[in-house]
Image: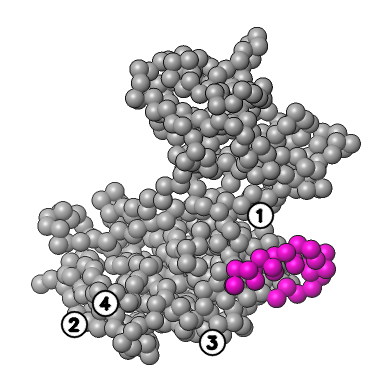
Amino acid sequence: MERLKHILLLILLVNTRQIVAQQEVSLNETLFIHANATTFVSGETLLYKIYCLKSTDKTPSAISKIAYVELVDNNSNVVFKNKLRLDNSTAAGDYFIPTTIKTGNYKLVGYTTWTLNSSVSKIFQTDIKIINPYEVNEANAAKDKNTSTNSTSEKAIVLTALPLNKEEIKDNNFKINLDKKSFTNREKVVLEIVSANSTPEKGNYSLSVRKIDNLPITKQLTASEFYKTAGSIETLQTKEKTILPELRGEMISGRIIPKDNSTSVQNINVALSLTGKSFAFKVVKTDQNGHFIFNLDKNYVGNETVLQVLGEQKEAFTIELDKMNEPEYSKLSFQPNFRLPVEFKETLLERSIASQIENAYYLNKTDSIVKPEKIDPFYAPLSKEYNLNDFTRFPTLKETIVEIATAASYKQNGNNYSLHVVDYTTKFQSPEPALVIVDGLLLQNVNELFTYNMNNVRSINILTGGYYVGPKVFNGIISIITEEGNYSSPQKENYILKPALLRPSLKKSYHQTDYSEGNKYERIPDFRSQLLWNPEVDLNNGKAITFFTSDLPGTYEINIEGFTEKGNPVSIKDFIEVKELQ
């Protein structure tokens, strides 16, 4: 019922586009971000989880399937942009802060295309401070030898050291149980999150355990505070136009441009290939303005995106993609520029050394990419597969078709070739060529395949008979799968576009150092300030959460944020001490 309401809303928006563009679109979607910190030193990693929620009751929003997270500097420039596929209305990402980023104030911003639809957009934003200790500013150094040289503004405020804030945050629904509060280096910590209810409510939560020090920070909005004050979050002016939500997944849109203005741009087939081992192939028709939209409803992980105009008139067109919808950042309000007094020198040195050591041993503590689920080709399971490793291999496509893939055939006219399917169950054989794809890449000119080394090919899949892909019917399918899944065509016709698109980030499983594995990490330095980051904490399984302390002594903050399925916020904060082993 909820999905039906969203579809009806979409139909209403499309049919009343010009009217809605002048009015306020009623939205019921907002975002919350939990970051592992708000102050970073070059070489550290910003970790975050984004929650896509209904504005009204903070339950998970089912509208958008794609979210965006950006880091914006005080000149409204986007430092990094992550595109995230939402799973159960949440997603997690990270950003390694390089030494090329200048010291200053930044904004971490989160939004979906749907949240950009009102005259003011309730995008989520939080202040981030970045300190680059490797910056050198000789002018400032000469003016003030007692201050650091991390800011170029003469009007910058001088920050003061803050006492460690050990204010615990309690939650009525859950609480943290620790067997003790003080630990030594590389000691196991057992953390239990106990529910006040016998049957705890399910939800989405993230957990951070991170060292705190005297560097100035910006207080991060908790889930509980967001629940109460979300309606008053600072808003940004956006363009007055209707932006469709990415309701089914990733959306790629654009238009075809004719070389001759008298050429009709309506009802022209456009194909999209997302090449790779789990490829996508889709075809859509253009509207009266030559505009087209592709929806990638699955988590395709592709090597290359290729768009092509189909048909006999294809050479009469070029393709142009729509510019991505973005908030208007010129109205963002940043905190004043700052200078760091000499009292922060020791803290900065400690954090800088720690990050350098951790980065030097990065290969021993890498995060792992969560293997995406296998996506079957669109023609499965109807095709007949010829696995070439089951046969005596032949070096050319001609020989392979004649000796192995007998359901296919080829025709030669001079130096030009075409590929067809052979359906022996019917008397009529269509003269039209088949749809030919290699690792998902559509080849409208197949000549290059007849010089391709077939030792690189793993299998050939053939489907006979008419087959609809979107609005286009093809006379069978010939799908060639290479061993590496990375076929790339040299064709560069004007009707082909190979854009460098921002694709959704791959899901990660974040590394956890485990000293119970014996001596694996015994001789490796451990200067982790981030002891644990788990963006998918399950508070309902009753299992204890374990992690190990590092070689860095100090105070560590345990922070849990999230929302239950009923929209109740969960915010918990506790602390532990790590002392050097005597």
Question: For the magenta stretch, what is the residue range?
Answer: 1-26
The x, y position of residue 278, in whole percent, is 47, 43
In the picture of the structure, the residue carrying the numbered disc 1 is 324
Residue at the limit of the structure toward the top, as seen here: 414
Residue 228's tag is: 3
In the picture of the structure, the residue carrying the numbered disc 2 is 180
User: In 3D space, how far apart are the residues under numbered discs 1 and 3 (Cα atoms)?
Assistant: 32 Å
Residue type for callout 1 = Met
Residue 576, quarter of the rendered image? bottom left
Residue type for callout 3 = Lys
Q: Which class describes the residues within 10 Å of circle 1: few (<14), some (14-19), or many (20+)?
A: few
Q: Which class describes the residues within 10 Å of circle 2: few (<14), some (14-19), or many (20+)?
A: few
In the picture of the structure, the residue carrying the numbered disc 4 is 542
**Looking at the image, is mark 4 or mark 2 earlier in the sequence?**
2
User: In 3D space, how far apart are the residues under numbered discs 4 and 2 (Cα atoms)?
Assistant: 19 Å
**Looking at the image, is mark 4 or mark 1 earlier in the sequence?**
1
User: In 3D space, how far apart are the residues under numbered discs 4 and 1 (Cα atoms)?
Assistant: 43 Å
Q: Helix, strand, or loop for circle 2?
A: loop
The C terminus - image quarter: bottom left
Query: Residue placed at 14% from the left, 62% from the top?
Result: 516
Contact (Cβ within 8 Å) of mark 4 with mark 1:
no
Closer to the eye: label 4 or 1: 4
Contact (Cβ within 8 Å) of mark 4 with mark 2:
no
**Looking at the image, is mark 2 or mark 3 earlier in the sequence?**
2
